[in-house]
Image (cartoon, coloured by chain):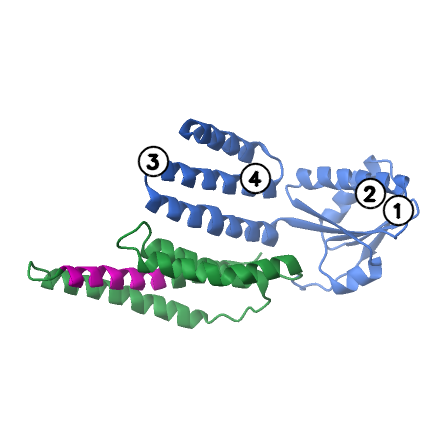
């Protein structure tokens, strides 16, 4: 986006860190408070959009993001199947919390990658 | 409280449909999404509210704005000199009015930019669809003749009673600006 205004650059540059912290907070507390992997991931993806708005830097590693998303999807499926197969009454509360936390983090990163890929694909490549 | 916000969502939804300018419609839709997310909160569904606020209000609004910017913008630079009098402002308003009607007729979004640079600078340095230069009471319109909207613009300006001079430019075929 050429000619971004100075005001936008400064305010969004300041908001940057807070968006990241908020996204991580939502993912990390997903199992005890509102929010979760998907919401936190979407907030983290908006960091990429802010980055696009405030800088002219168009270098984004598509192949890496796409690959990471695929790997994470596979991991999520494997991990939940593994947990369901081994889930019984012997598991402690901590183990279940740990499972939810790990799932939230994995889903968060996956959604972040997915939405960024969608956004940048749309912005940089689709044209008339 | 809840009823007020429900009525406001309806108002903003109707405004988003009824407005003629696409950019305003996108902003109204964004406000509608934000109100929706607040209503979810009042219905004690904070989870859905967060998702709605992030997806509906931020991501989709930005995507729509980018889409409008990419496909549907008719960019006009208006170059004028420093010493603007009352009469010159009249001309600017008239031109803007004509171009707004024109852009509504061809369903494009008008991006009307006032500039104090000269027309030659604008033509060489930025991407444009039309550059208009005001010289006293005379308007000079620079436009790409390969752009098929140029003839349409001429027609609209003959209807308005402004004194206009046309200066067609030729661009290389195959340049992909915009």
The residue under label 2 is B92
The residue under label 3 is B43
> How far is the residue under mark 3 from the one under mark 4?
27 Å
Comparing labels 1 and 2, the label whose residue is closer to the camera: 1
Report the chain holding disc 1.
B
User: What's the magenta region?
Assistant: A93-111
Measuring from the top left, give residue B149's x and y in whole percent.
72, 47
Mark 1, other Cα within 10 Å: few <14 / some 14–19 / many ≥20? few
Q: Earlier in the sequence, mark 3 or mark 4?
A: 4
Taking B11 as reference, is A9 left or right? right
**Quadrant of the image occupied by residue B160:** top right
Q: Tags 1 and 3 in contact by the CB under 8 Å rule? A: no
Q: Residue at x 37, y 36 (%)?
A: B42
Quadrant, the N terminus of chain B: top left
Q: Which chain is green?
A: A
SS category of the residue bearing label 2: helix
Say whether residue A62 is magenta. no
> How far is the residue under mark 1 from the one under mark 2?
10 Å
């Amino acid at each position: 986006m050429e000619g971004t205004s100075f005001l936008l650059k400064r305010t969004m540059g300041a908001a940057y860190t807070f968006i990241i912290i908020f996204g991580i907070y939502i993912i990390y507390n997903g199992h005890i408070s509102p929010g979760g992997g998907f919401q936190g991931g979407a907030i983290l993806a908006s960091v990429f959009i802010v980055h696009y708005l405030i800088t002219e830097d168009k270098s984004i590693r598509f192949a890496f993001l796409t690959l990471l998303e695929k790997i994470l999807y596979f991991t999520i499926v494997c991990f939940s199947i593994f947990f369901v197969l081994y889930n019984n009454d012997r598991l402690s509360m901590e183990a279940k919390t740990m499972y939810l936390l790990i799932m939230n983090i994995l889903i968060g990163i996956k959604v972040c990658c997915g939405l960024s890929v969608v956004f940048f694909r749309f912005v940089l490549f689709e044209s008339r | 409280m809840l009823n007020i916000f429900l009525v406001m969502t309806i108002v903003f939804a109707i405004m988003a449909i009824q407005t003629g300018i696409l950019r305003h419609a996108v902003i109204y839709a964004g406000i509608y999404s934000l109100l929706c997310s607040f209503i979810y909160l009042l219905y004690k569904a904070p989870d859905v509210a967060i998702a709605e606020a992030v997806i509906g209000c931020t991501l989709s609004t930005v995507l729509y704005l980018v889409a409008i910017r990419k496909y549907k913008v008719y960019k006009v630079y208006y170059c004028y000199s420093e010493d603007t009098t009352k009469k010159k402002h009249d001309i600017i308003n008239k031109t803007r009015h004509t171009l707004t009607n024109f852009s509504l007729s061809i369903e494009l979004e008008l991006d009307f930019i006032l500039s104090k640079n000269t027309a030659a600078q604008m033509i060489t340095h930025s991407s444009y669809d039309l550059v208009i230069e005001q010289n006293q009471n005379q308007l000079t319109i620079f436009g790409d003749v390969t752009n098929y909207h140029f003839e349409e613009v001429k027609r609209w300006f003959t209807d308005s009673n402004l004194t206009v001079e046309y200066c067609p430019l030729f661009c290389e075929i195959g340049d992909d600006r915009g």
